[in-house]
Image (spheres, rainbow, N blue to C red):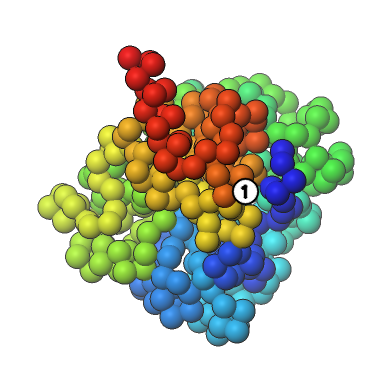
Amino acid sequence: MTSEARIKGWCPGAWRPMATGDGLLVRVRPLGRLSRAQLLALCDASEAFGSGLIELTSRANLQLRGVSEAGWPELMAFLVEQALVDPDPEVERQPQLLLAPDWHVGDATHEAAHLLLARLAEMPPLPAKMGIVLDAGPLPVLGEASADFRLEQSASGALLVRADGRALGTPVDSVAAGVEHLVRLAHWFIESGGRESGRMRRHRAPMPGWAPALMPPAQADDRLTLGTHPQGAVFGLPFGRTTASVLRAAFESTMATAVRVTPWRRLLLENVGQAAAASIEGLLNDESDARLSMQACPGAPYCDQASVETLGLAERLAGRVEGSVHVSGCAKGCAYQKPAELCLTGRAGRFDLILGGRADDTPIATGLTETELEDYLENLNASRL
């Protein structure tokens, strides 16, 4: 990894924002859902205190960009008033809960969320990036989402608690027992030296005897597809970002009653009919749209570590390049930690081109301008025909 990619060992929050190239990044952690009033309040806050840009993260958080240090205290007062942020900063330090977005009131995922919320204070202090997935529907959907402990179902319908990085989990006989097991696992993680590992998947200590790995989870279901859904309609965000004005217009034109957030750059707007779901300007409603499968970080000028603009290039390349594409402003590769068939990494204002690798892997071409890059890709595509 190059020296210009500086890894930060924590994730931004609301009480602990992160300074970026365009101001403070303030991240709001909804428990899977925002009411209509909360979503509209978040749009108002984005425009009043930030740049109007809103991003959806891979942990189903919503973040506001461009907040000034002078405006941050007033923003926080507003977010607390709208129940978008807990008034106690310590709550933000608790492990994040990520819910399967198609939960129903009273189902296992919903029940587990409320039981676990009531017990988060019992958790030991965990490393900053740790989280818990609650994915207890008939078919797990969050298998690729970043988390350290998971509550999910097996193929036989049994509830499982599974540690990330382990193929098998421990069956439990009730949601309450599953929550108890999750709390106990968090303590075991710290007691067995997990703090040094930072994440469960990197922790090599053998699982305790009371957490036998006996059963695999059920085969994963597909993520939410764009279009109509039993609970409303699903829309995509180009490269995981949009503006407050687009979101506000979406709610006002569809009369959506709430929004479910997902880790896949998709939003589920509740109680939206088929006619209203047909098209919303600025959001994606076509599953074949190439921007859904492309990875791009904010780039310059939004990130102070990026030396190149990324989003415009990704937009121009959408549909022109086959396979998975990752456009990264620097070698840190925040948007995508896995290998991509084509990876473009910014370095000193130009691009390095990597085939089948990550943003910090060895390039096959270096120091390309955008024009040189596009010419190179045209030749590469021609050679594949």
Circle 1: residue type? Ala
Where in the figure is residue 126, as x and y percent of width and height?
A: 76, 52
Q: Quadrant of the image for the N terminus?
A: top right
Q: Nearer the viewer, residue 19 or 223?
A: 19
| Above or below, 102 relative to 222 | below
Instruction: Look at the image and tell me whether residue 301 can be seen.
Output: yes
| Above or below, 41 relative to 285 | below
Where in the figure is residue 120, as x and y percent of width and height?
A: 68, 58
Element type where label 1 sits in the image: loop
Q: Quadrant of the image for the C terminus?
A: top left
10 on left or right of 108: right
Q: Nearer the viewer, residue 239 or 351?
A: 351
Residue occupied by mark 1: 348
User: Total number of numbered labels?
Assistant: 1
**Residue, x 53% and y 80% (percent of image)?**
75
Which residue in the rendered view is the most extreme toward the left?
Answer: 275
**Residue, x 51% and y 67% (percent of image)?**
65
**Residue, x 57% and y 70% (percent of image)?**
23
